[in-house]
Amino acid sequence: MTSPFVPAMSGETHVAVAVVDPDQASRSRLAMQLGQGATPFPSVADVAARLTGAPVVIVLGPNCAEGPELDNAADLMTRRKEVGALVVAKELSMSIMQLSLRAGIRDVLEAPVDTGELTEAVARVAGTLTAAPASGGVTGFEVDGELGRVITVFSTKGGAGKSVLAANLG
């Protein structure tokens, strides 16, 4: 299946770029700044419906900096490790930065954004992405259908045997 996105170059990696904004003029402006490598979408749900497992950078436009599209992007990035996002906000504020940080957004830029700055931000986000496994399975530490477990060995004093116990458990 071919990717519905036009791939953009990021170093040696081909990364799809999706520009999301409910306002058609805003998303067209951002897509035009990014050139042929960007595909405009009115919502994150439209992007999610067309994912193929290839790395995708979502550029959330100024009308997505606060509200449901930011939450939708956060949910998508949690489920799909090949998806990363950045926000172009109307103005930078502490609340926008906090919301973006909590959503897992990699970068926040202030509109109007310089084309070079936007391209660099997309490349930075693209550098953090990995393609989904070809099998379409769950990403993470899955072996024979069972996820790995984390076991903590703890003691408040030295010489209790924590290292020996941890090594034997490992």
Image (tube, grey):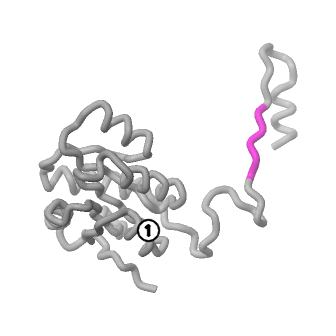
- Determine which quarter of the picture holds residue 51: bottom left
The residue at the point 49 percent across, 71 percent down is: 53
Which SS does the magenta portion mostly show?
A: loop
Name the quadrant of the C terminus.
top right
The residue at the point 35 percent across, 67 percent down is 15
Residue 168 in which image quadrant: top right
Mark 1 burial class by Cα count in 10 Å: few <14, some 14-19, many 20+: some
Horizontal relation, residue 83 to residue 166: left or right: left
Choose between 14 and 136: the one closer to the eye. Answer: 136
Q: Say if 52 sits above or below 160 in the image.
A: below
Q: Residue 140 location, x and y as percent?
A: 63, 57
Which residues are the magenta region?
Answer: 148-152
- Say above or below: 55 vs 120: below
29 sits left or right of 5 in the view:
left
- Whether 154 is among the magenta residues is no
Residue 72: percent from left, percent from top: 43, 56
Question: Residue at the location (41% across, 66% down)?
Answer: 45
For badge 1, the amino acid type reads Ala
> Taking 128 as reference, is 132 left or right?
right
Residue under label 1, please give it.
Answer: 48
Q: Residue at x 23, y 45 (%)?
A: 89
Q: Measured from the top left, where is residue 154 in percent x and y?
A: 78, 25
